[in-house]
Amino acid sequence: MTMKAGTNLEKVLESGAFAVTAEAGPAKGAVTSVIERKGEMLKPCCDAVNVTDNQSAVVRMSSWSSCVLLKRLGLDPVMQIVVRDRNRLAIQSDVLGAVAMGIQNILCLSGDHQAIGNHPDAKGVYDIDSIQLIQMLKGMRDEKKFQCGEEISGEVPIFIGAAANPFAAPFEYRVLRLAKKVKAGADFIQTQAIFDVAKFAKWMEMVRDRGLDKQTHILAGLVPIKSVGMARYMKDYVSGVYVPDEVVTRLEGAKNAKEEGIKICLETIEQLKEIQGVHGIHIMAVAWEEMVPHIVEQAKLLPRPVV
Amino acid sequence: MIVGKQKPLPEIREMIADYGNILILGCGTCATVCFAGGEREVDILASSLGIAAKLEGKERVTTKHTVKRQCEWEFLDEIEEKVKQADAVLSLGCGVGVQAIAERFPEIPVLPGLDTLFMGMPVEEGVWVERCVGCGNCILNQTGGICPIARCPKGLINGPCGGYRDGKCEVDPTRDCAWVLIYERLKKMGRLDMLHTSQPLKDYSKMGHPRSITR
């Protein structure tokens, strides 16, 4: 079949293999070593690596430049774009630049509101929303047109991604929202972290009922938990993350919370593998990237397919 | 209505420091209704500034007046004499009122006594909330009569972000997520189908400043 962008991630997903992606946060400075160290660590165990775009509305090195650094190391980067900081002109020009540098997986996000980050006085842009961003990228790729309708010279091969939060109430609305993203042109989906597998399975059932799993590749999100404090913090303060009480209780009762956190993560992966329509996992090991190779190995997902 | 709130007294005192004779000018429309700059607030502010002047040992004359609307020329004629006698006008109208005074009386300094905030309404006693941003392209017919541009901090027009929790906004957990409200209202109306349609990119040229219409 013809590939949309021909990235490693797209090839792995199209081959039918169970994909593994991970997230890497860029440096809070201009040093290249931070993202490069994470890249070296993640390269053997991931099909693609996401680079966040000023996550939690905290300023870091830009996603696209960090992606370039990963690309140089031979990784397949996923550039995350949030619509908080850039308008339609800036986003389109960044996308052209990214594709020119070989960065062709792009994840479209709303982004955390600036009020919760480290520049709360900033003016939020929100010129377009995440669904419109998907549409805009699809137009750039499939019609070779800018959002305004003007022709783009040459091809813009992009593999378009979007996020999904299967847990926020009203529950039934979340599937509707996914359907909208798929209709807009999302080729792959990376979900919010899953701790409540039963609820996720119910969501996937609704996804399958609508046939959405056949139209997009769904990668199930995971956040390995390092400590009881982290579990509590995520439960109470992290936007969009749902940590059930049982997880907190289990970590509280554990002798070694780190080991227990990894155990929970591995058990979740085993359960996710069994859910029909899940095409892979996306590991967001926040400031704990060094655990990803171990998790992928223990989950028996090594070696990664060569496609 | 246009909702504003009075600037803190120290800020007002600093603004008027160079002027001995001040006309405190209230506005009888929006600023009165939102208890920010009507006759009552003019009286209170005049007393406060009087006390402050005494404490500082300063000579200051304040004149009080409230017009029906500061934002229309026809209501400004009545203050011409009072303005001429003042060193400065301290307007308790919104930003529109302040600018109308400045334009009508070009030789007299006009000072803003309010911070103008938003277009909104009182939802309960003492609580005003924003309802409209004047985007120039109303879509309320498609969003159950609830505006996501004014009521979602990200102004998202295609549904909520992933950050809301238990129906509350990620920016302020005491506030309802606009999109959850929209969802629930459309559900009650039996019109959840409206959520399937994707809204196109918004034409922000209709919000480009300064805007005007001619009839």
Image (cartoon, rainbow, N blue to C red):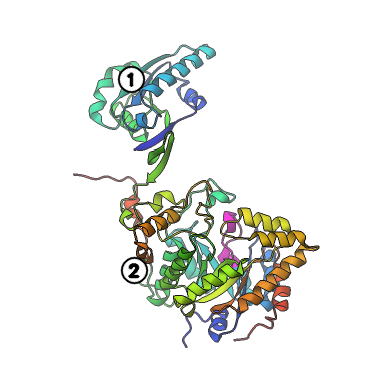
Q: x%, y% of residue A238? A: 60, 56
Identify the residue at the far bottom of this view. Answer: A1
Q: Magenta segment range?
A: A51-68
User: Disc 2 is attached to a residue of which chain?
Assistant: A
Q: x%, y% of residue B211? A: 30, 46
**Res A78 quadrant in image:** bottom right
Label 1 to label 2: alpha-carbon separation: 55 Å
Question: Does the rendering let one see residue A181?
Answer: yes
Amino acid type, mark 2: Gly
Q: Residue at x 71, y 65 (%)?
A: A288
Amino acid type, mark 1: His
Question: Does the rendering let one see residue A290?
Answer: no
Q: Nearer the viewer, mark 1 or mark 2?
A: 1
User: Mark 2 sits on what residue?
Assistant: A149
Residue sitting nearer the eye, A176 or A25: A176
Q: Residue at x 67, y 80 (%)?
A: A301
Q: Quadrant of the C terminus of chain B?
A: top left
Residue sitting nearer the eye, B106 or A112: A112
Disc on res. B48: none
Q: Is residue B11 magenta?
A: no
User: Mark 1 sits on what residue?
Assistant: B65
Q: x%, y% of residue B97? A: 33, 32
Mark 2 surroundings within 10 Å by alpha-carbon count, few (fewer than 14), some (14 through 19), many (20 or more): few
Tell me the element at label 2: loop
Does A7 sit left or right of A247 as displayed? Answer: left
Q: Residue at x 41, y 72 (%)?
A: A183
Residue sitting nearer the eye, A275 or B71: A275
Does A188 sit left or right of A32 as displayed? Answer: left
Tell me the element at label 1: strand
Q: Quadrant of the N terminus of chain B?
A: top left
Does A77 sit left or right of A110 as displayed? Answer: right
Q: x%, y% of residue B102? A: 33, 29
